[in-house]
Image (tube, grey):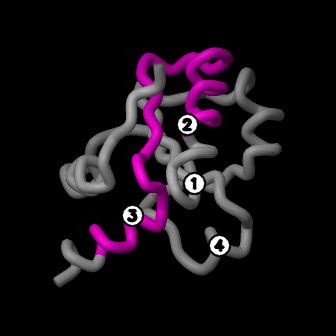
Amino acid sequence: MVEELSPETVCKRIERGETFDLIDIRDDEDYAEGHLPSADHLTIEELENIVVDRDWADEVVIYCYIGQTSVQAARLVEKYGDSESVASMAGGYNAWKSVDTVTSN
């Protein structure tokens, strides 16, 4: 079962400068409009094409719009990638926006 991390946990990890792959699997336009700091962008199709060949960090966190597709993407990386730990961000980017607003003030 894929672990789910709260947006607050992901935010704290980013603020502490922890090393992990942060993957945004939303559409190109939505990524361009806004994304988490240091997030790489891969559509789900791109992820499927490169999951085996990519050199993954030991820890990977994936997010989408609301945290559903990212769970499936995380399962894909967990099964075919070479990462030790893969998680989905609960609530996705929609949940992040409310956390980011709080932490920015």
Three-letter residue code for mark 2: Val
**Residue contact between numbered discs 4 and 2, judged by CB atoms under 8 Å:** no
In the image, is residue 35 above or below residue 75?
below
First in sequence: mark 4 vs mark 2: 4
Query: Which secondary structure class fits the magenta region best?
Result: helix
Residue stretch in magenta: 71-100
* Mark 4: secondary structure: helix
**Residue contact between numbered discs 2 and 3, judged by CB atoms under 8 Å:** no
First in sequence: mark 3 vs mark 4: 4
Looking at the figure, which quarter contains the C terminus? bottom left
Q: What whole-number distance in Å separates the C-alpha atoms at marks 2 and 1?
A: 9 Å
* Residue marked by disc 3: 95
First in sequence: mark 2 vs mark 1: 1
Residue 87 image offset from top left, x and y in percent: 44, 33
* Residue marked by disc 2: 71
Q: What whole-number distance in Å separates the C-alpha atoms at marks 4 and 1?
A: 10 Å
Q: What whole-number distance in Å separates the C-alpha atoms at marks 4 and 2?
A: 19 Å
First in sequence: mark 3 vs mark 1: 1
Q: Give the residue displayed 73% in from the left and 21% down from the top.
A: 52
Q: Nearer the viewer, mark 3 or mark 4?
A: 3
In the image, is residue 68 above or below residue 65?
above
For the residue carrying disc 4, how many other residues have a C-alpha within 10 Å: few (<14), some (14-19), or many (20+)? few
* Residue marked by disc 1: 64
Does the magenta run of residues contain 52?
no
Three-letter residue code for mark 3: Ala
* Residue marked by disc 4: 30
Please state which of residues 43 and 39 is positioned toward the viewer in this rendering: 43
Q: Give the residue displayed 57% in from the left and 54% down from the top.
A: 64
Left/right placement of residue 78 relative to residue 6 reads right
